[in-house]
Amino acid sequence: MRFYSTRNRNESYGFAEAVIRGLAPDGGLFVPEEIPRLPPGVISSLGSISLRDVAYETVRPFVASDIPGPKLEDIVNEAFNFDAPLVPVGEPSPSGEGGRFVLELFHGPTAAFKDFGARFMARAFAYLRRNESRPLKILTATSGDTGGAVASGFYRVEGIDITVLYPKGRVTALQERQIAGLGCNIKAIEVEGSFDDCQRLVKAALSDGELNKRLVMSSANSINIARLVPQAVYYASAAGVLKRRGGAAPAVFCVPSGNLGNLTAGMYAAKMGAPVDLFIAAANSNRTFTEYLSGGAYRPRESIATISNAMDVGAPSNFERLSSQWTADELRRLIVGVSVSDDDTRAAIAAVHRDYGYVLDPHGAVGWQAVSRLRGGGLPGDALYTVLATAHPAKFAHVVEPLVGPVKPPPCLEEAMAKTVHSISIAPEFNELKAVL
Ligand SMILES: *Cc1c(COP(=O)(O)O)cnc(C)c1O
């Protein structure tokens, strides 16, 4: 499998090179030359084989030329060491108004879905760099959860240093401890600006000629193809399970979206043959992609702070990937966009707790509310709706607890809360970042 830049079809790269570079030399994002179709025997068994087996089959065609099968099996077994249960919430029957499935993606070490991509990527990097003597410096910008997941995924991985940039005052106390509490090979930088500033700084560093002479650098954002591909796995597995339960009913996956990495991975899964009929891109008040999907121009802008802060993205980086692989018409046919206010997000958290005894985090609640708004009005009432729960509600206790009462944190979050923050503060200027690096 070869990979191209979204901005240049003339030069191709192998998986290892695309992963280590992170970003193409022309500033574009790497995309696979084709999205391979899974063999029919695999597609028909998606709902009955383990998540790890789905992972192996889904990832293999992308990496086969650089990671041999038995090694990939090891990587996948270590990366997918927790489950992604599909939980019925309310009455899951196709005619049930309230009921739907929640795909819980928060059972990893930092309690957010980004653990899937980060754990796979860390192990893939370690393998691909096994013969190198110079350390690899990985730069990553985070709006909240990426940093923690990447820090945890790479913590103490030999030969790799991590630098995480996060927007000052826009991540929670817990997220900050997950990012800046580990130390060792993990460096944390607090930027006096927005997530978009952090992202811009990382992009500038990765394409800076002088830094590239001095350092071997890469990125670990959702722009890295090694983060994206493993995220297709849980869609494929869940879609297979739904097909077995729901027969001919269409499967709709609702994805709480920010940088659109998760949604892009879902599109890959569908193209590979996973039985997904439609996606909902659920956004908070950052409506860039929502407006595009409803026929408007793509107009990147400053991000707006909301209670679902991991989705506070005004210029979603994976849009470039989506729009290089699908036409606008295709995207608008396969994805429906909805934007949900903070008030409606809070109302959904309270209502789902009251009606079903289930606690959503603010990101999952944006997804839940998006389904409520579309089902019956525009989208079929008889489809099987699945909302991706991208984080554990205890990660956002400051939002959730005033609405539903105390939420018990999983052990991994209790450990993180006990850590001390060590980070470096900078203004959102490239020269300041450069000095730190
Ligand atoms: C990162 C994140 C999102 C957004 O995912 P994208 O791939 O950036 O669209 C949603 N929810 C949570 C909890 C996240 O951490």
Image (cartoon, grey):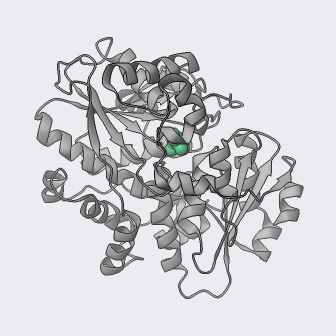
- Percent x, y for residue 30? 53, 57
Viewer-side residue, 318 vs 139: 139
The answer to whether residue 31 shows anywhere in this view is no
Q: Which residue is pictured at 48% across the width and 50% down the height?
A: 111
Query: In the rendered picture of this protein, how many numbered marks are placed on residues?
Result: 0
Q: Quadrant of residue 66?
A: bottom left
Q: Is 98 displayed left or right of 299 in the figure?
A: left
Q: Which residue is pictured at 28% across the width and 13% down the height?
A: 376
The answer to whether residue 307 shows anywhere in this view is yes
Q: Is residue 55 above or below residue 201?
A: below
Viewer-side residue, 260 vs 2: 260
Q: Which residue is pictured at 26% across the width and 45% down the height?
A: 238
- Percent x, y for residue 371? 36, 22
Q: Is 309 displayed left or right of 276 in the figure?
A: right
Q: Is 192 displayed left or right of 367 in the figure?
A: right
- Percent x, y for residue 389? 41, 38
Q: Which residue is pictured at 28% across the width and 49% down the height?
A: 236
- Percent x, y for residue 194? 74, 39
Which residue is most to the top? 377
Give the position of the C terminus as an image quadrant: bottom right
Give the position of the N terminus as an image quadrant: bottom left
Viewer-side residue, 266 vs 407: 407
